[in-house]
Image (spheres, rainbow, N blue to C red):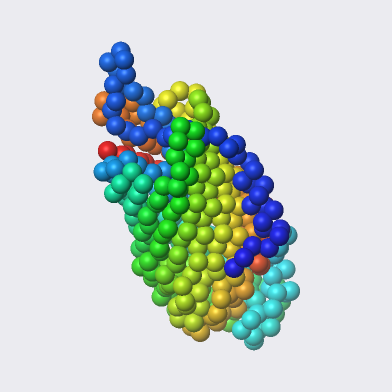
Amino acid sequence: MFLNNKKIICVAILLFNINILADENHNNIEFNIDNGELKPINASGHAPIGVMGEHMHKKSEWMASYRFQHMSMEGNRIGTNEVSPEFIVTNVANRFSPPATLRVVPTKMTMDMHMFGAMYAAADWLTLMFMGMYIEKSMDHITFQGGSGTTRRGTFTTTSSGIGDTKVSGMFRISKNNTNKVHINMGLSLPTGDTDKRDTILTPGGARNNVVLPYGMQLGSGTFDILPEVTYSGKIDELSWGAQYMGTFRIGDHKGYSLGDIHQVTSWLSYQPQPSVSISTRLAYKNEDKIDGIDGRISLPVQTADPDKYGGDTINLYFGLNLVGQTGALRGHRLALEAGIPVHQDLNGPQMETDYTITAGWQFAW
């Protein structure tokens, strides 16, 4: 889908947040300098760890990576307004009536992702990338008694874990000189994540039923997804910066539905006080559409079962740290950390709001 004018303005502001100068990233090949010592490897040669596919490699180079991402969500929001569980069960209609209003409210969710990546440069102008992941999700709920009112019957937790969707892509160099670099990334997400996860819930009547979990607790999209991306990066002296657009476009549907298309824009600025250390700040805008269609197996009096209660607009602010070893066995090994908090959330709610995200990672090229 196309962005509306409001979304285009947000994208323009983010892109304007960068300069139009750049320099090349350094790789891990051990060139000697005049005094016989190894050339330093710049920590700012890579973008913040939360940015994917932001750099390319020279012909025949490999890179292995591992990222761990933890996301915490707590509380609910309709649009930009926070709402209580009691408000939701007395004011929000149940799509699958009866009962007339929602009777189960999610209150907290955590998601942990283990991401394993590999990159190989088939040519100076082409880098191939692979990423697989393992996902763990947990969601706490409150169940309200009967078909109306605010009497709480009890609480329960659902969980799901397993392999997520797999991503493969090719990055193509568009331009590169001493001060600028631009590349595009054409990727495909393969539907390797499970969409049939089940768990036991507490119903308003007090029964414990085993059901197919709502969309947000499944591990994959169920569809092949096209992942176009454009990245600009730059560096001068101790400063480096960049910007990236990434889209997610669903092909067809799965079990009667498809997750919403996604548009993401991010820009970052890094400062490198010395070659082994860089610190960064990053702003990221995300627009996600509602789910299109419906899975006939999912018909519960909870917001996460309603395809219209997904998506919205968010802006997150991140702070990061990149470290790279310079000598001995640690040379070329990169460790990175990035933490983010939301500064704006306008959600198709009621929907759970994000509290924070933390990403840590390791990278090594040879």
Q: Where is residue 302 in the image (x, y as percent from the top left)?
A: 59, 74
Q: What residue lies at 52% left-to-right and 70% top-to-bottom?
A: 259
Question: Which part of the image, by quadrant, shows the N terminus?
Answer: bottom right
Q: Residue at x 72, y 68 (%)?
A: 87
Residue 141: name its quadrant.
Answer: bottom right
- Residue at 32% x, 33% y: name it: 28
Residue 198 vertical placement versus 7 (above, below): below
Quadrant (top left/top right/bottom left/bottom right) for the C terminus? top left
Locate residue 150, reporting x and y percent.
Answer: 70, 72
Number of marks drawn: 0
Residue placed most toward the observer, 69 or 328: 328
Q: Position of residue 60 (x, y in %)?
A: 26, 43
The picture quadrant where one finds residue 360 is top left
Residue 10 in sight from this viewpoint: yes
The answer to whether residue 342 is seen in the rendering is no
* Residue closest to the far top: 35
Task: Determine the image quadrant of residue 168.
Answer: bottom left
Q: Is residue 48 left or right of residue 330?
A: right
* Residue 144 x/y as whole percent: 63, 74
Which residue in the rendered view is the most extreme toward the bottom?
Answer: 98
The one nearer the camera, 174 or 117, is 174
> In screen coordinates, is 313 left or right of 224?
right
| Residue at x 61%, y 84% (from the top left corner) | 96
